[in-house]
């Protein structure tokens, strides 16, 4: 258990950008649009926003509250934190079991996601260079683009190097610490990402129809948001709505409590800051994320291609690498720059999210094993290398675009385990610590007030019930 005093964020804007950086990731630009396409288009927004209000925002508040409380009291890690607050109602032994299970699931989830997530970041880095150097110009079809990807993956000199370079950059950032590393990176990368995103949205919505007159990008945009209400009768739509909220907000994964929230100052306005970062994330997801990949994919492949996305046969990642490169490849210099913007946006989005997960790992070695940050970084690197290399080897051995491990990890870690961790956290904060104590901590130093009824009923009762229903459905259909 670390009795180490944690650093604090240097500036408010740095804190907000780092927290938004943690949330805004690959999920906003490739996972969300594909989920929306597959689960009802405009109708998907119903389960999605329902989950935002009933689960996302409450759990965000819970994590910020527990995290700051832990950071200020020298127990920034998730498990010791849950232990401390649970002891109020449970015997020390039950509290320990409860905390260790919750903490372990969160840890495993984090490591699983880091392995595949950092690989994809490396690939995106390579693709942004490939676009600038005109390598997309020879790609005509989605199959060409698929072959390009397979060539890249089966050449370890390229794919492994791309991953390792990005991993090295991310680990170097984190090893410089919170203020000098993470906060500075967020201040540079997040504004860059938003500017790139806006340029891409404009490009995507004004592109017209470069390939076939009836395949205009605007039509793709319209297609995406046309509500397909019949999808709402499928419970999977609700699971996927909630799963995406968890994934995109980076909650339920020990990415906030033992981590960014533990560096908060005592007087920070938690409700306001948490809502600000959530809003930035939703802007990047629902406004920007939905306006790039799908409209462009439609302009590239028309209704036939989109039907495959709708049927779940092409994932968000598949759209990103099989439709967009050949489209950009046909657009000459504009396309080369567009492709660079698209893949570097994904790179920035990924990096600012992954460094949060990497910081959790490094902090454990620094605080619990008393290593210095550089040594801690080295060990974190080894762990990520071991978990991530599977993605690489497996991807290289297969000729399919998505690897089995990646799919599996994304499904279990990216949708299921997040719900389990969240359940532990809500129970710890509201049931074991107590509605009043947690409410008071949430509002320490705050101007903004969260209505007490929302805390008591929505966070305390509806959200755990909702989680239980979703988990029950998961188990029932597994
Ligand atoms: N929120 C990130 C995204 O949308 C994913 C992520 C989850 C990153 C948890 C870190 C921790 O892509």
Image: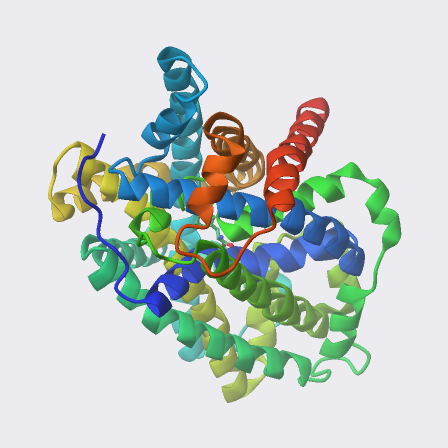
| Residue lying furthest bottom | 333
Left or right relative to 354: residue 336: right
Residue sitting at x 67%, y 68%? 297
Residue in view at x 40 percent, y 28 percent: 85
449 lies above or below 303: above
* Camera-nearest residue between 403 and 101: 101
Q: Is residue 94 visible?
A: yes
Observer-nearest of 424 and 455: 455
Residue 425 x %, y %: 49, 33
User: Is the residue 331 above or below the residue 67 in the image?
Assistant: below
The residue lying furthest to the right in this view is: 230
Can you tell which quarter of the image residue 302 is in?
bottom right
Q: Quadrant of the C terminus?
A: top right
Q: Residue at x 60, y 78 (%)?
A: 201
Q: How many marks?
A: 0
Quadrant for residue 87, please give it. top left
Quadrant in the picture for the N terminus:
top left
Using the rendered image of the protein, determine whether residue 393 is visible from the camera's viewpoint.
no
Q: How is the image coloured?
A: rainbow
Residue 309: percent from the left, percent from the top? 71, 55
Q: Position of residue 193 (x, y in %)?
A: 45, 72
In front here: 377 or 132?
A: 377
Measured as percent of width and height from the top left, residue 407 is found at 55, 40
Q: Nearer the viewer, residue 299 or 330?
A: 299
Q: Residue at x 19, y 37 (%)?
A: 367
């Amino acid at each position: 258990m670390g009795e180490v005093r944690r650093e604090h964020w240097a500036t408010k804007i740095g804190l907000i950008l780092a927290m938004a950086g943690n949330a805004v990731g690959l999920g906003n630009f490739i996972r969300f649009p594909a989920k929306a396409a597959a689960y009802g288009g405009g109708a998907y927004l119903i389960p999605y926003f329902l989950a935002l209000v009933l689960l996302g925002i409450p759990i965000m508040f819970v994590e910020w509250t527990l995290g700051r409380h832990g950071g200020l009291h020298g127990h920034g890690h998730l498990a010791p934190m849950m232990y401390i607050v649970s002891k109020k109602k449970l015997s020390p032994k039950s509290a320990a079991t409860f905390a260790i299970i919750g903490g372990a699931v969160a840890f495993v989830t984090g490591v699983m996601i880091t392995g595949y997530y950092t690989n994809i970041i490396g690939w995106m880095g390579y693709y942004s260079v490939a676009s600038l150097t005109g390598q997309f110009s020879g790609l005509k079809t989605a199959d060409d683009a698929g072959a390009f990807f397979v060539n890249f993956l089966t050449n370890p000199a390229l794919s492994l190097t791309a991953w390792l370079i990005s991993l090295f950059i991310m680990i170097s950032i984190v090893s410089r610490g919170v203020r000098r590393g993470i906060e500075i990176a967020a201040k540079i990368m997040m504004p860059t990402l938003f500017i790139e995103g806006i340029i891409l949205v404009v490009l995507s919505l004004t592109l017209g129809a470069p390939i076939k007159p009836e395949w205009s990008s605007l039509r793709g945009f319209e297609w995406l948001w046309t509500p397909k209400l019949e999808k709402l009768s499928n419970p999977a739509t609700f699971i996927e709505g909630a799963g995406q909220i968890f994934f995109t907000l980076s909650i339920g994964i020990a990415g906030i409590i033992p981590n960014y929230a533990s560096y908060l100052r005592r007087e920070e306005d938690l409700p306001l800051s948490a809502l600000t970062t959530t809003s930035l994330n939703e802007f990047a997801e629902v406004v920007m994320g939905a306006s790039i990949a799908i409209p462009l994919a439609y302009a590239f492949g028309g209704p036939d291609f989109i039907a495959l996305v709708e049927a779940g046969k092409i994932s968000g990642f598949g759209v990103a690498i099989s439709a967009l490169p050949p489209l950009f490849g046909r657009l000459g210099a504009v396309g080369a720059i567009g492709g660079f913007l698209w893949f570097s946006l994904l790179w920035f989005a990924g990096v600012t999210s992954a460094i949060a997960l990497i910081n959790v790992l490094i902090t454990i070695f620094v605080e619990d094993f008393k290593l210095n940050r550089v040594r801690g970084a080295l060990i974190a690197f080894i762990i990520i290398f071991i978990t991530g290399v599977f993605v690489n080897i497996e991807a290289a051995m297969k000729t399919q675009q998505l690897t089995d491990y990646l799919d599996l990890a994304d499904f279990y870690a990216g949708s299921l385990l997040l719900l389990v961790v969240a359940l532990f956290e809500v129970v710890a904060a509201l049931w074991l610590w107590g509605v009043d104590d947690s409410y008071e901590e949430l509002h320490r130093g705050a101007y903004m007030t969260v209505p007490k009824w929302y805390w008591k009923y929505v966070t305390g009762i509806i959200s755990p019930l909702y989680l239980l229903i979703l988990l029950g459905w998961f188990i029932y259909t597994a």
